[in-house]
């Protein structure tokens, strides 16, 4: 394998519905943005693409990826579609990484979209629930928020996590997004507002859950030679990892924690893992990515994280899987203020527990506030991480509030099903 | 050859939501011939008021939600009868859902754990208000008399 760099990226505004543009035009808009941002890069330089979108039901068009390839003027170059539920975008990013790392391509375009506003929300929830076992899960009342609600009820039972801690995640991500013009649902919230919003599946309220979205994102990856030739300000992809688990939450084993280098088996004595409260696939993805990037203690060695917060609860669960804090500490981690941006006033008082180094989680606003056009989401994270590491947030968001000072290394995390496919990728400033 | 050929007009129309851009209603419906395949005996069991799990013939791992082969060692499984009593491992009450289930809201989902069984079973709980449900609560299986050959042919009530 050879080194891989991200050399440009682009996204569209995410919104509940974008009826003025179809999926081809959305990707074209994101693609044109990425091309314009690196003027030395032309379409001719791109050797092929990978396209990600989750649901043929939403698109009502099979082989939509081939139609995007056509619309972007990339025929007859190689292309394929990848799909893996909510992790579709993260898988797409890693598939493009593979194309370059293997030497098959010098420059590969990862492009993704979703058009979820083409059906009503309740129909969209039905489509999403078809990504659960259609023999045993879907017919019982298939509803993903219901599945995640059951997970967090167990997390609360095992570890004492509270709805207020979840609400703080909602406050953080929605407030961060006030400075991100691409975001779908920015806002300044209080714990009371989060708890008082419509109850969807107890204990998750409307403000604990991301929305249906439309939008597109692209990430362009290149070999070292191509990155040097094309100039600009490339960022290196230093680690990729992927993990999996049973589609049916009911099948989760209750065994031993998969340990990261900074953890020991003794600290998890008695914890039945992953149960329904943790994501074994997320831990596996992190372990593999950390191994490749040479990270031993992620809480100390990462500068920011863009993770798949489809639910406030899954952000807390994921911080544990990624080893930012120990299993069971996710709620206290939020209380401590560590994952919040130090330059913003969230209207919250933090516990100030000094156990964890400040490490902004979802500085972009995450899925909760940016939206979750599934096939684009994992690539959106790559684009925000790329801009953070380049130091160009101010240029791209027309506001430098979210720009971290001198970030060196960031993590992106994409997540599907009930933790069924999960990807973790590490990006580093060159 | 008929140079005056003309399609017959009819009075069918299109449901139009918007004109800029044009947004029309497009109906889509499908009937699948869905086979439960190797899971079929579970559904037959429900018609006889039996809750069938599967047990690995090699490592003896026991699955409350059946599967034809063991997820740990890959060996074939055999059927065994689960008890009709279990405990709530976790739960939620859904006030919203997919279109197919909207008319049933609010409904309560539980994951049931059974003594001596390694995995869980997703089901509905009735007969308890949300505030009356807790982790560890004992529950009892009930079966529909008029079977639908769906996993909802079994449901649970407080024991």
Image: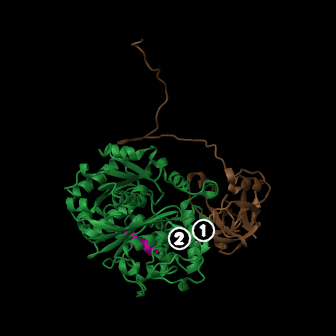
Residue found farthest to the right: B48
Provide the secondary structure element on which disc 1 rests. loop
Please tell me the colour of chain A: green
Residue A160 lies, with reference to residue B80, above or below; the image says below
Quick check: is A173 in the magenta stretch? Answer: yes
Report the predominant secondary structure element of the magenta stretch: helix
Structural crowding at the residue carrying mark 1, measured as other residues with C-alpha within 10 Å and reported as few (<14), some (14–19) or many (≥20): many
Query: Where is residue A99 drawn, in percent x and y?
Result: 36, 56
Report the magenta residues as a range: A167-174
Q: Is residue A261 left or right of residue B42?
A: left
Front residue of this view, candidates A55 and B119: B119
Query: Where is residue B74 drawn, in percent x and y?
Result: 63, 62
Q: Chain of mark 1?
A: A
Q: Chain of mark 2?
A: A
Label of residue A280 in the image: 2
Query: Where is residue A218 drawn, in percent x and y?
Result: 33, 56
Provide the secondary structure element on which disc 2 rests. helix
Quick check: is B153 in the magenta stretch? Answer: no
**Residue at x-position 40% and y-position 49%:** A80
Front residue of this view, candidates A9 and A120: A9
Please tell me the colour of chain B: brown
Res. A107 image quadrant: bottom left
**Residue at x-position 27% and y-position 64%:** A397
Query: Where is residue A348 drawn, in percent x and y?
Result: 40, 80
- The alpha-carbon separation of the residues under discs 2 and 1 comes to 9 Å
Residue found farthest to the top: B1
């Amino acid at each position: 394998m050879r080194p891989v760099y991200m050399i440009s990226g682009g996204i569209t505004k995410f919104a509940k519905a974008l009826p003025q543009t179809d999926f081809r035009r959305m990707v074209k808009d994101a693609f044109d943005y990425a091309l314009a941002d690196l003027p030395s890069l032309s379409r001719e330089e791109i050797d092929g693409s990978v396209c990600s979108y989750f649901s043929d039901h939403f698109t009502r068009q099979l082989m939509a990826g081939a139609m995007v390839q056509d619309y972007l003027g990339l025929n007859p170059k190689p292309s394929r579609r990848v799909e893996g539920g909510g992790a579709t975008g993260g898988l797409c990013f890693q598939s493009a990484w593979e194309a370059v790392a293997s030497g098959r391509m010098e420059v590969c375009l990862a492009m993704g979209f979703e058009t979820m506003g083409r059906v009503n929300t309740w129909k969209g929830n039905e489509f999403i629930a078809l990504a659960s076992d259609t023999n045993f899960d879907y017919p019982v009342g298939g509803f993903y928020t219901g599945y995640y609600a059951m997970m967090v009820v167990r997390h609360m039972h095992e570890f004492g996590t509270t709805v207020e801690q979840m609400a703080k995640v909602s406050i953080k991500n929605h407030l961060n997004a006030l400075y991100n013009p691409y975001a779908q649902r920015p806002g300044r919230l209080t714990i009371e507002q989060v708890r008082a919003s419509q109850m969807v599946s107890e204990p998750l309220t409307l403000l604990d859950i991301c929305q249906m979205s439309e939008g597109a994102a692209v990430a362009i990856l290149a070999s070292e030679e191509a990155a040097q030739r094309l100039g600009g300000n490339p960022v290196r992809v230093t680690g990729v990892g992927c993990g999996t688990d049973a589609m049916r939450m009911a099948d989760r084993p209750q065994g031993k924690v998969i340990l990261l280098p900074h953890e020991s088996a003794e600290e998890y004595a008695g914890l039945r893992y992953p149960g329904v409260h943790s994501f074994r696939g997320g831990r596996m993805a992190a372990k593999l990515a950390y191994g490749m990037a040479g990270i031993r203690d992620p809480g100390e060695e990462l500068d920011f994280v863009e993770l798949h917060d489809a639910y406030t609860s899954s952000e807390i669960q994921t911080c544990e899987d990624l080893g930012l804090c120990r299993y069971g500490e996710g709620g206290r981690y939020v209380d401590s203020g560590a994952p919040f941006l130090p330059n913003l006033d969230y209207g919250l008082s933090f516990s100030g527990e000094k156990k964890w180094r400040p490490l902004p989680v979802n500085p972009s606003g995450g899925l909760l506030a940016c939206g979750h056009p599934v096939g684009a989401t994992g690539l959106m994270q790559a684009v925000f991480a790329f801009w953070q590491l380049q130091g160009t947030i101010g240029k791209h968001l027309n506001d430098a509030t979210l720009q971290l000072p001198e970030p060196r290394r960031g993590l992106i995390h994409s997540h599907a099903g009930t933790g069924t496919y999960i990807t973790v990728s590490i990006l580093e400033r060159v | 050859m008929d140079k005056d050929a003309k399609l017959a007009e009819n009075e069918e129309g299109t449901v139009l939501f918007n004109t800029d851009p044009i947004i029309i209603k497009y109906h889509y419906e499908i009937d699948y011939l869905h086979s439960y395949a190797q899971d079929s005996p579970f559904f037959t069991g429900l018609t006889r008021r039996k809750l069938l799990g599967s047990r690995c013939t090699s490592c003896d791992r026991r699955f409350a939600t059946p599967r034809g082969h063991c997820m740990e060692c890959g060996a074939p499984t055999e059927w065994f009868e689960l008890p009709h009593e279990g405990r709530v491992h976790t739960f939620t009450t859904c006030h919203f859902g997919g279109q197919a289930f909207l008319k049933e809201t609010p409904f309560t989902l539980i994951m049931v754990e059974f003594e001596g069984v390694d995995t869980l079973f997703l089901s509905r709980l009735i007969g308890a208000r949300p505030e009356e449900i807790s982790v560890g609560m004992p529950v009892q299986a009930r079966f529909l008399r008029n079977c639908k050959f769906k996993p909802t042919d079994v449901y649970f009530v407080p024991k």
